[in-house]
């Protein structure tokens, strides 16, 4: 699976594969294949930094909505957005949770989850922020399609979890 091509440094795939992942295995395999298949474009883009703005806290009424979506990572490489790979940084989740917990107009925190999981690095800190927020405000979660591995780790910090009928939930495992 991690064969080198002429246009992509083997080190990128090696670095991705070497990272401990808590992610649904099929989607992790798809990520590796997607990166490998975009080899020609990657060579030029690897050196380009794409500005990724920090997400803003979204409040509906008095409820803070915190998205946990796509691949979860300690730091999201800028090239992922270029290739249309949805990813969320654990630091963004943690920052939004801390903002929501501190905001006087927010009475509850609601996690909107649709993620197969991600890297192990960073997930414990984001989970700790969610656990801490529970002592200040109720934390609930709704799983739209999937909350696997690291995403379930975060989702499990909520006091109440709901899900769409066919949502996949669970499986905290590390590769």
Image (tube, rainbow, N blue to C red):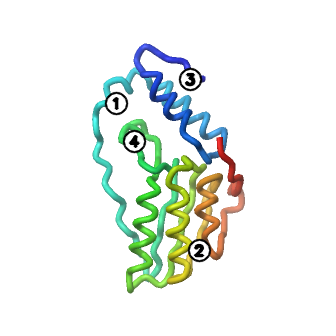
* Gap between marks 4 and 3 measured at Cα: 19 Å
Mark 3 or mark 1: whose residue is earlier in sequence: 3
Residue 92: x and y, percent? 41, 59
Tell me the residue that label 1 is attached to.
Answer: 46
Q: Which residue is mark 4?
A: 77
What numbered label is drawn on residue 140?
Answer: 2
Q: Are marks 3 and 2 in contact (CB under 8 Å)?
A: no
161 w.r.t. 71: above or below? below
Callout 3: helix, strand or loop?
A: loop
The label nearer to you, 2 versus 1, is 1
Instruction: Give the residue drawn at x 50%, y 54%.
Output: 122
Say which label, 2 or 1, has the lower sequence index: 1
Q: Dot 4, crowdedness within 10 Å: few (<14), some or many (≥20)?
A: some
Residue 69: assigned label: none
Mark 4 or 2: in front is: 4
Does dot 1 land on a helix, a strand or a loop? loop
Point 60% across, 39% down: residue: 28
State how far apart marks 3 and 2 are (Cα).
Answer: 39 Å
Disc 4 is placed on an element classified as loop
Picture quarter with the N terminus:
top right
């Amino acid at each position: 699976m991690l064969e080198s091509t002429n246009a992509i440094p083997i080190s990128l795939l090696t670095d991705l594969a070497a990272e401990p992942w808590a992610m649904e295995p099929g989607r992790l395999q798809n990520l590796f294949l997607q990166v490998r298949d975009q080899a020609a474009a990657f060579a030029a883009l690897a050196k380009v930094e794409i500005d990724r703005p920090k997400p803003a806290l979204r409040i509906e009424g008095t409820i803070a909505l915190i998205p946990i979506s796509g691949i979860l990572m300690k730091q999201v490489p800028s090239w992922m957005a270029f290739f249309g790979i949805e990813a969320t940084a654990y630091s963004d989740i943690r920052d939004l949770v801390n903002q929501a917990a501190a905001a006087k107009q927010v009475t509850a925190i609601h996690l909107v989850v649709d993620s197969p999981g991600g890297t192990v690095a960073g997930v414990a800190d984001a989970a700790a922020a969610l656990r801490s927020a529970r002592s200040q405000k109720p934390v609930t979660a709704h799983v739209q399609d999937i909350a696997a591995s690291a995403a379930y780790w975060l989702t499990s910090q909520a006091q109440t979890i709901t899900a769409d009928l066919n949502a996949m939930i669970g499986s905290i495992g590390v590769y």
